Image (tube, rainbow, N blue to C red):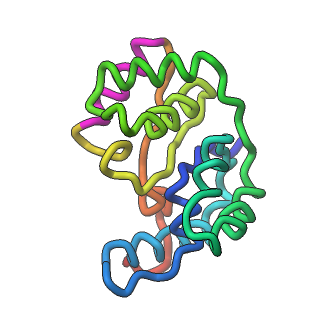
């Protein structure tokens, strides 16, 4: 059985966005995401949710169709009531701000479905070393094993490709 990965919206956004010439960090994230998608995604069972679809449908009018095309390769998970309950606990007991409730919901969806990894480039609210210990503690206190929250770079594993 392959490891399971919940694909948060930043992943499909970086897959289809234009390579940034103004921000080298964003360009590196885009390249790493594309490398992971082309070389390693087949090593994982990919999951998302209607929340990812909704968020991927927004933004630049030229890009949603392409983002949604990538999501066709992802199994969509239900967003059960207990995911919303866990989201509220995450907002109440961690440093995820109320304005980032969708970020807390991504974590909650992955946790209630027992997904092993949550891939994201959202290091402000999700893959944040200060926030993560509290997020993991809240998930466990509510009876869920949290997904390991990481970036595509961390999911590349041992690759023969050059590092970016």
> From the image, which quarter does the C terminus lie in?
bottom left
| Left or right: residue 128 compared with residue 36 | left
Name the residue located 68 percent from the left edge and 41 percent from the top edge.
50
Name the residue located 53 percent from the left edge and 74 percent from the top edge.
17
Q: Position of residue 96 (x, y in %)?
A: 32, 34
Q: Position of residue 27 (x, y in %)?
A: 40, 78
Q: Nearer the viewer, residue 116 or 63?
A: 63
Specify the quadrant of the image occupied by residue 128: top left
Q: Confirm whether the magenta stretch covers residue 104.
A: no
Q: Please identify the residue farthest to the left as the structure is shown.
A: 130
What are the residue bounds of the magenta stretch? 131-142
Specify the quadrant of the image occupied by residue 89: top left
**Numbered circles on residues, count:** 0
Q: Confirm whether the magenta stretch covers residue 136.
A: yes
> From the image, which quarter does the N terminus lie in?
top right
Q: Position of residue 35 (x, y in %)?
A: 54, 73
Identify whether 81 is placed above or below 47: above
| Left or right: residue 71 compared with residue 90 | right
Identify whether 98 is placed above or below 118: above
Q: Position of residue 82 (x, y in %)?
A: 58, 16
Identify whether 161 is placed above or below 80: below
Q: For the stretch drawn in magenta, what is the main secondary structure? A: helix
Name the residue located 51 percent from the left edge and 28 percent from the top edge.
108
Name the residue located 66 percent from the left edge and 41 percent from the top edge.
49
Identify whether 59 is placed above or below 141: below
| Left or right: residue 117 compared with residue 76 | left
Specify the quadrant of the image occupied by residue 20: bottom left
Q: Nearer the viewer, residue 84 or 118?
A: 84
Q: Please identify the residue farthest to the bottom as the structure is shown.
A: 21
């Amino acid at each position: 059985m392959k490891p399971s990965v919940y694909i948060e919206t930043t992943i499909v956004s970086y897959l289809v966005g234009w390579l940034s010439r103004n921000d080298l960090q964003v360009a590196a994230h885009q390249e790493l995401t594309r490398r992971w998608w082309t070389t390693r995604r087949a090593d994982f069972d990919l999951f998302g949710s209607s929340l990812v679809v909704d968020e991927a449908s927004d933004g630049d009018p030229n890009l949603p169709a392409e983002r949604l095309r990538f999501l066709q390769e992802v199994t969509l998970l239900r967003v059960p009531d207990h995911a919303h309950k866990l989201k509220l606990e995450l907002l109440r007991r961690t440093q995820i701000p109320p304005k980032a409730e969708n970020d807390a919901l991504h974590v909650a969806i992955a946790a209630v479905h027992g997904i092993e990894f949550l891939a994201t480039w959202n290091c402000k609210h999700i893959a944040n070393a200060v926030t993560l210990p509290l997020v993991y503690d809240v998930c466990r206190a509510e009876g869920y094993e949290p997904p390991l929250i990481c970036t595509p770079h961390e999911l590349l594993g041992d690759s023969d490709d050059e590092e970016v």
